[in-house]
Structure formats: structure tokens, C-alpha cells
Amino acid sequence: MYAEVIIDIAAAEVDRIFDYDCGGFDIKRGMRVSVPFGRMRAEGFVIGIKNSTDVPVEKLKSIASVLDKTPIITEELFDLLDYMRNKMHLLHVDILRLFIPAAMRGGRVKELTRQLAVIADDYRDRDPDEFIRKTAIAQRELYDYLTIDKPDGEYVSELNKIMSASALRNFAERDIVHIVNVEKRRIPYSDMPVSEESEELTLTDEQQSACDAINKTQCRTFLLHGVTGSGKTEVYLRCIREALDKGKTAIMLVPEISLTPQMLNKFRDRFGDEVAVLHSGLGQGEKFDEWRKCLTGEAKVVIGARSAVFAPLKNIGIIIIDEEHDQSYVSERNPRYVTSAVAEWRKNYNNANLILGSATPSIETYYAAKCGKIELLELNGRVNKRPLPEVRIVNMCNEARKGNHSIFSDELISELKNCLNEGNQAMLFLNRRGYASYVMCKVCGYVAKCERCDVSLVYHKEEDRLKCHYCGNLYSPLTECPECGSKFIKEGYIGTEKVANKLDEMFPEAGVLRMDNDSTRTKGAHARILGDFGAKKADILVGTQMIAKGHDFPDVTLVGILDADMSLHMADYRSVERTFQLTTQVAGRAGRASLPGKVILQTHTPNHYVYNYVRSGDYKGFYSKEINLREVTKYPPFAKIVRILVSGTDDGKASNVLKNIYEKVVSIKDKYPDKFIYLAYMRAPLKKIMDEYRMQILTRLTPDTEEIENLIYTAVDECKVSGITAYAETNPIKLS
């Protein structure tokens, strides 16, 4: 027998099938093996077994060892591999790596086993006086403990803490106790308080209609559009319960790791140990054990970030993508994929339902629903008829004219005082981390920039370092200008770290927590910060977009949006849409329980039309205006953007690759001129990242151009050279 193997090396030159003799091993498709490869030993994925090979006998090598007891890649995932190869032009190995925990590669994680002490059956019901002397008090205590308190056994490590180690050794030598190795599962968030068993909620008429529409059909895609606080999560839970009752499984995706603990608590309350959680914030052992729960069928429901869409569940009945508009569902690094496209494929494969949920759906998704391509379900009111929070727009230009140059308007400070005096909580949102966004010399205008990237350095006061947010490089803070020697150094825009410091100064009696990428780097930090805020150990939570979505804190009555314009003026056709989504989502954190909510939205452009729609919570009005603009300007969904990015440390070599690709794309345009709306090449807005020069080709195509899109992707594949990265992406999240 011969095995077809993909070598676990991410290089296009070796991304093909290699035949190996099975060497007498019982090998199945979906296992991993260790094989001789050139002068080294490499891991590989077995993607097929066959009876014959075209490889000459003298060149054929044998498999050295088998790394898995059973197949770890399911037949469904093998079919998904073919789809992603053809659609997204990815390497075999890059896709295969998505299907398993990263730490499995190289054997960096294994099953955790512990020694368990169990009373032997022959001694379980006997009179202990027969084999324990009356003076052996420690042995009698151990025997009573293992037969009465722990009849199923106790870990040796725990026994050694509370019982006599010599008594245990004596029992083991006499076979009174058997010491066996058993697997110990590592459970994520095991120390998270379990919520009290909740009563079955009564659904609103809109919630019930949504559940009925979803549960009565199969293999459909739904957009569940519901205002913040309308009870979308309860609809998800009911539909998952329906799927489980039919013997099926479910995948629940959330956009932020920070949402997982709160959501997990609700799901464990409903579905108990059948829930598994998968995301990058878990420990290697935890992720490995949760993934195996899915593979073995122990887990019926998976919750996680975008990578959980590859969970090895079988017989999926429903897939849910909460906050479907969120950018995090698009992988911007290799391997590049769109989560909703993978979910749609798995939906079709399993004849399942797919729910896309959001209070602020992407323009493209809502357009698809209005056109009837997917089914639109709406929740127009909050549960218990709670009102949406009052949104007040504050003109920060007027604040500056009054002499207030702080990031806090007078109105926000006043409302914060009222909120805290009434014993309530507040959330302040600023989508910029660090202490200052840049440092600049006031005399000559010098701005500190990263040596490896074409970006300004951000000052982090806690670390007292300048940091590059792209490559992570750290630099000493400026005490004087390196260009002119001036000591007059100006700090740029305020970040979350400085906001938290200012609040500590202004409200010393109030507890202030900060939630951003810097404060959540340690394991369990997300759950700890949110848990402390939920337990009212702090009164104010300052954060980036991590706090904008999904969180439900009943005592939050005030939300402050410190700089609503941050995303508004970006050179991106989605900038207004993202501003509406982000401000609406964070505003929805206020007034979710019985207390009314208030939002202070600070802006330098108060007359921009987007804020009128935010104030009224009018998504449909915003959509109507935005879709008209998109149609006139020919942007998605009325066009398809294909971007080709080329990067490399050798600027000239990268330029040549770009030129070769551009010539091929021009030849495609010459054949199909009516399909191209726009074509140009240029330096990328971020010209260099991590020592690599970046340049791009931008095309806008008519919507019905899947064949043209594939030709462009193929052109990129044909022009790739060693040392230069080149890839194409459709409707990219960022154009920088």
C-alpha cells in the first residue's frame, strides 16, 4: 500500500503530493506521518491511500512513523480543502494547518495524563480489619476516603496533599489500591462562575417568528437583523436546541475573543458539557482537548472566533455568525479566507441552516437579503420593550472654542459624575490604544517612525516605550529630537491608556478598567476584566472595539464615544459604513436593563449625515442612502474589487513581479473590456511593513465576473517568484 502525502512545509515548490510506501503501518487517509524528506525528517498529512504508484522502486521511500492513532481530518474537511484550493488559490498545507491545533505540529502538545488511585474491587466491600492493623490509622483514613468520599478514585497528586504518602505506597504494593494512568481534560474557563440556572424566557412575537422560520426549513441562509438588545442570542440558543434535538451539531461564531466568556457561560448553562470553545486565546493544551472533544463527538456545540468554522464536527445542523459585519471574520494573513464563505460551503455540505446576525449588517449582506438571495428576519424592538438609549451629539469644535482642549467634553464629564453618583456604570470607547498615537518635535516637525515599517511609533506610558503596532519593535522614548536636539516634544492623539490615567485623576474614588490589545495579552485577561466589571469591582470601563459589541451589563447607563470621527475620514469606500456600525454597536451597550441609557457621542463633524442615523438608530435609513451612493459610484455590491498585493525586501525584484502581473491583467482586460470598471497599479498606502516594500494593483470588476476573478488569481500564481510574496484578494477589508 502507498500513501499520498502533503509535506508540512509552507512552500509552493513542495506543495504537491509525494508517494510513500506504507512500510507495514496501518495508515488511513486523514492521519499524520513522519517521513524522510531530502536530508531531513518531516511531518506530513496523508490525503490518500492507493494500491500502486508510478514512482520507481529505487526512489520510493517508506514512512518512518505514524503520528496519530486515528484520522484527525474528516472527509468533509477534505472536500473543504478542495473548495478552498480552487476558490482561494491557497496551498494544500496552509489549508490543512487550519484544520488542527497549531501545537499538534511538531508534537508540542499531547494528552495530559495523571495517576489515579482506585480501591481494588477485591477490597472494596471487605472488612478493613482483615488487612489493616488497628494501629495503622493513616491506612484506615485512606481506605475510608477512597471507599466513601471518592469511590471512583482520586488523583495521586491530590491524595499526597491530604493523606499519608507511605500509606498509599503500602496499599499499592499490596494491590489494595491500583494506580492507573487516566487522561485529564484541560477545560477552558473552568474557574468561571457558573450562572444560576436561568428560567426559560418567554419569546417575543418577533423572536418566535424568527425561530419558526429557521426551524421549519433547512439548507437556507438567514440574515437576523435585530437592534441592539433585541434578543438575538436567545434566538440562537433556541435554534441550536432544535438542531441538537434532531441529533445534529452546531457552530456559534463570535467576532472577538472578549465575547467568548460571556457567551460561553450562557451556552454552558443551556447545553452543559456538550459545549466546546475554540479560539487563539486558549492555552495549547486547552485548545487541543477542546478540539478533540469535537473530533470524537463529545462536543455537540462549538463556540469560538473565526477559526472555529473549521471545527471537526459532523452532521452540522446550524451555523451562526454573530455580528456578521465584523472585519475580524476576514483573515488578512496567509491563509486568507472569508469566514462566511467557508460557513456557506459547510452549510451546503451538511444541508444545514446558516444565520448571519447583526444590528448593523454589512451593506452587501443586507442588499443580498433585500434582493431575496438570503432570507431576511427582523427584530425591530428591544426585549421587554426597553427603549434604545438617547444619543446626544457633542460638537468638539465648540468645546475648543470655549477653551476646553481635553478629550472629554464638559457634557461627558457632567454625565459621568451623575452616573457615578447614582451608583451606575459607564463605558468609554476610543478605538486607539496606547498613551499617544505619535511623538513629534515641535521645532522641526520630526516624527518618530519605525525603522522596519512606514508608520509612526505609538507611545506606551506603562512600558515607557515607543512601540510599532505592525512589527512590535520597541524603542526608547524621546527626551530630545534626534534631528535638531530640541527638547520640545509633542504627544499626538490620546489613546486608551491615557484616557484611563486621566479618569483615575478625575475620579479617584471610581474604579477604572482598561480593555485593549495591550491589557489583554495575558491568558484569561478578557474574562478577568469583564468579570470584574460585571461584578461592579469597577465603575468605568475604557476600551477599544473589544467593548463595542455583544456585552450585556445591566448597570451600564452611560456610554461615551470619545472620537467618533476616527474611522470616518479614512480613504476607504466603507469608512462611513464602519463609523455607523461601530458607533451604533457601542451605543447599544447602554440601558440594556430596566435603567434608561444615555450616549454622549463626541465629534468634530456633527453635521455629517451618518450621525443623524446613529442618533435615531435608523439602520434602514442609513442603508437606503449608502446603497444609492454605492450604485452611483460603482462600489460593492455593484462591483467587485480585486486587489493584488506584492511585497518583498528587494524593492526592485518586487516591482518586476508587480509589472509582470500587471501585464497579464491588462491582457485579461483587453479580452474582456466591458468587465473592467477600473485598473491601476501603485505603491500601497503603507509602503513598507517589517522591512518589506509593498505595492499593489487595484481592479474594479462588474459583479458577474467570477471567471475573470479566477483568471486574475491564476495570473498571480503564474508570476510568483522565490523571496517575493504576491497574492490576490476579493473585496479586501483594508486597502492600506
Image: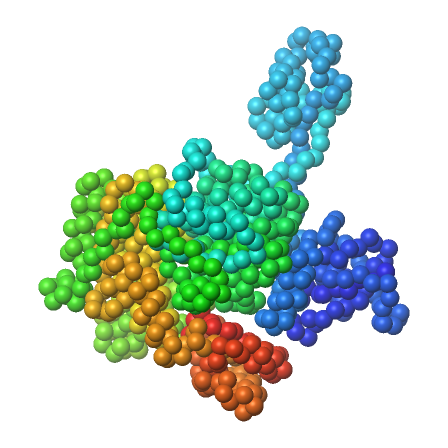
Can residue 304 be seen by looking at this rendering? no
The quarter holding residue 160 reads: top right
Q: Number of labelled discs?
A: 0
Q: Left or right of 448: which side holds 351?
A: right
Q: Position of residue 463 (x, y in %)?
A: 37, 57
The quarter holding residue 174 reads: top right
629 or 293: which is nearer to us? 629
Q: Left or right of 304: which side holds 14?
A: right
Q: Position of residue 268 (x, y in %)?
A: 50, 39
Image quarter in which the C terminus is found:
bottom left
- What residue is drawn where x is 63% and y is 12%? 137
- What residue is drawn where x is 87% and y is 66%? 52
Q: Position of residue 276 (x, y in %)?
A: 56, 45
Name of the residue lying farthest toward the right: 57
Image quarter in which the N terminus is found:
bottom right
Which color scheme did the rendering employ for the protein? rainbow
- What residue is drawn where x is 67% and y is 27%? 117
In this rendering, is residue 291 above or below 442? above
The quarter holding residue 670 reads: bottom right
- What residue is drawn where x is 45% and y is 41%? 266
392 or 522: which is nearer to us? 392
